[in-house]
Image: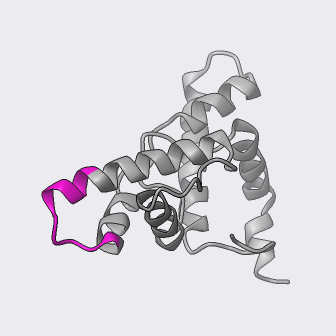
Amino acid sequence: MKYHGCVLDFTDQRNDALMKAYREAICECEQICIADIAQRIVNKPCERFWVSEERAMVVCAALMQGKPILEPMRPTKREMFQEIYKRVMDMKKGNEDCDLLTLVVHVVNSPAPKFYMRPRCAMEIIYKVKKGFYENQFRR
């Protein structure tokens, strides 16, 4: 688990992707309804899965061992890890000699079908980006 105040290595990259999706969603709408826009944003494809390789590896390893690691997760996170695990297992079939970390790194850094976050969370991040929260966070 990440600790409070933890900033992941890909935070800026994720924020840029969210802002791009936000701008695209705004341009696609004739009338602006934040709930609809937020829903469109989180369902847009993105350049990677927004989870660290380390966390994805821990979850995939636990799933391979049959541990019920997905049960306490939110539905969006559970769906994301199920997709990652499915892709890892599909890749493993063609690459039997590849280690789990290599497979997970490849999958996590491949395009994702959506952002796998709740619409409300996406909008909170967008509002923070617009207010300069992430720039100010490093000045404290």
Q: Residue furthest front?
A: 66
Q: Is residue 18 positioned above or below 43 on the image?
A: below
Q: Is residue 7 positioned above or below 123 on the image?
A: below
Q: Give me the residue at 60% from left, 48% from top.
A: 77
Q: Residue furthest right?
A: 140
Span of residues in magenta: 90-100
Name the quadrant of the N terminus. Answer: bottom right
Q: How far from the left and from the top, in percent, is residue 6?
A: 73, 75
Asked if residue 116 can be seen in this view, the reply is no
> Is 51 placed left or right of 100 in the picture?
right
Q: Give me the residue at 50% from left, 36% from top.
A: 44
Q: Give me the residue at 74% from left, 22% from top.
A: 33
Q: How does the figure colour the protein chain or chains?
A: one colour
**Which is more toward the observer, 64 or 127?**
64
> Is 107 placed left or right of 43 in the picture?
left
**Which is more toward the observer, 114 or 102?**
102
Q: Give me the residue at 43% from left, 45% from top.
A: 83
Q: How far from the left and from the top, in percent, is residue 126?
A: 71, 49
Q: How far from the left and from the top, in percent, is residue 18?
A: 59, 48
Asked if residue 128 can be seen in this view, the reply is yes
> Is 137 placed left or right of 55 in the picture?
right
